Amino acid sequence: MYFEYGNKEIEYLKKKDKILGNAIDKIGHIYRDVDNDLFICVVKQIVGQQISSSALKTVWARIENTVGIINVENICNISDDKLQKCGLSFRKVGYIKNFAQKVKSKEFDIESLWNLSDDEVIKQLSSLNGIGEWTAEMIMLFCMQRKNILSYKDLGIQRGMRMLYHHRNIDRKKFEKYKKRYSPYGSVASLYLWEISANSIPDLTDYAPKSKK
């Protein structure tokens, strides 16, 4: 399953921002995996914090082999030690088990998130141990497929903006200007900014000041 968008979103962004529109034409349609199981998505986002995508793939495969079906019961029942042996830190294991236990006890109503506004979803998810604003935004984008997610705290988004608009840095004021321009389709803009940050357009470069050694 991929993040769903089409001509309506693309034409809107191209009309609002010709520079981004030119990049969209060069990159083409982006097929970005999403998962509509909220419980799995939250667990996976915790697992993936501060590690590379390739490391996440390896650790996640180990978790699936060890746990089997990733659901509330299985996560609650597996030992902390077995989860750690999959490549998880003690802290991440604690976050995941605490989350699963709250869902099991119905202290945290995960399915209710579907009916909340973006701001309310962030508030609810951020109440969980190990979940901050950025992680909540990634869950909204890659699971809930919310249409207007553009994360200021995402380094890839900031790098993509620097490259696309030739900025040396992206402060909050610049970011908010672009976020307003992309709205209500910030999520699609995010997909393209990530692609740009990964050097998908060879003639673009990062204008961030080089660090002094």
Image: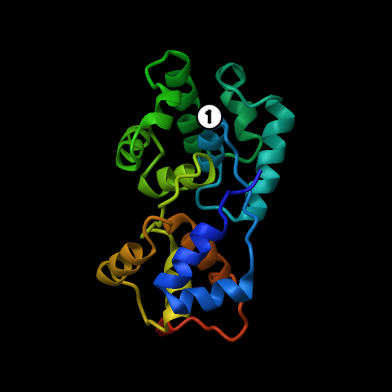
Q: Is residue 82 left or right of residue 186?
A: right
Q: Determine the residue positioned at 48% across, 47% down.
A: 141
Q: Is residue 117 left or right of residue 29?
A: left
Residue lying farthest to the left in this orientation: 173
Residue 11 lies, in percent from the top left, at 50, 66
Q: Foreground: 17 or 92?
A: 17
For residue 113, what is the image quadrant? top left
Whether residue 148 is visible to the viewer of this picture, yes or no, is yes
How packed mark 1 is, by other alpha carbons closer than 10 Å (few <14, some 14-19, many 20 or more), is some
Whether residue 199 is visible to the viewer of this picture, yes or no, is no
In the depicted structure, whether residue 76 falls above or below residue 153 = above
Question: Quarter of the image containing the N terminus?
Answer: top right
The three-letter code of the residue at mark 1 reads Phe
Residue 204 lies, in percent from the top left, at 54, 83
Q: Foreground: 73 or 59?
A: 73
- Colour pattern of the rendering: rainbow
Residue 60 lies, in percent from the top left, at 66, 40
Residue lying farthest to the top in this orientation: 105
Which residue is the site of mark 1?
39
Q: Determine the residue positioned at 43% across, 57% down.
A: 185
